[in-house]
Amino acid sequence: MIETKLPIEVEEKEGVIVKPKLGVEKRRLLRVRKLQKTKKPDFIRQESWRYKRVKSSWRRPRGRDSRMRKKDAGWPKSVEIGYRSPVKVRGIHPSGFEEILIHNPKDLEKVNSKSVVRIGHTVGLKKRLIIIEKANELSLRVLNTRGVGEDEPKESEENGI
């Protein structure tokens, strides 16, 4: 079993975990994290707005005369330690469960019932279907099924295009 950071109590209905029973402190910290994220700026790379070739993904400004490194007014905010979320709720899904990243069906054996599963983005459709099926057998919640296994026809199929 994969060990969780915090002991999590859960509410069950017919053997399926519905939601975790969160303590007052943990619930408060999840609200604090949500509020912090609304105030956190989008950290963008220096001069990414100026040149198309410079992508906006964050890179630390290192220039000797860099206004962004010097934290001049009017320049984008830099990443700092103060923007981190509270320690007790780091890595925890907003629902209160701990997330565990899965890449193959064998990884599901290590997951306990007090966690939720997120399938890695590199996993293909065939293996994704197997993982979802096995997770349902083990009564585990999968966060990102990506609509796999839904019987609804797409718009293009309805219109005959």
Image (cartoon, helix red, strand yellow):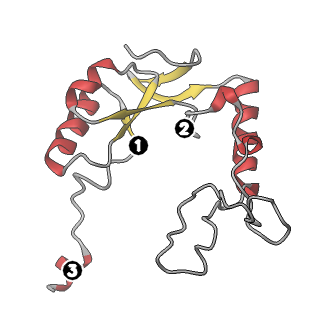
Kindly identify the amino acid type of the residue bearing the numbered disc 2: His
State whether residue 113 is above or below residue 120: above
Q: In this view, does 37 lie to the left or right of 10?
A: right
Check contact, mark 1 vs mark 2: CB within 8 A: yes
The residues tagged by marks 3 and 2 sit, at their Cα atoms, a distance apart of 34 Å
The picture quadrant where one finds residue 96 is: top right
For label 3, the residue is: 156
For label 1, the residue is: 143
Kindly identify the amino acid type of the residue bearing the numbered disc 3: Ser
Q: In this view, does 65 lie to the left or right of 54?
A: right
Kindly identify the amino acid type of the residue bearing the numbered disc 1: Leu
Question: How far across and how far down the image is residue 93, in percent?
Answer: 54, 37
Q: Residues within 10 Å of mark 3 (few under 14, many from 20)?
A: few
Residue 20 marker: none
The picture quadrant where one finds residue 33 is: top right
Mark 3 or 2, which is nearer the eye?
Answer: 2
Q: Is residue 150 or residue 5 the one in the foreground?
A: 5
Residue found 53% across the figure and 23% down from its top: 11
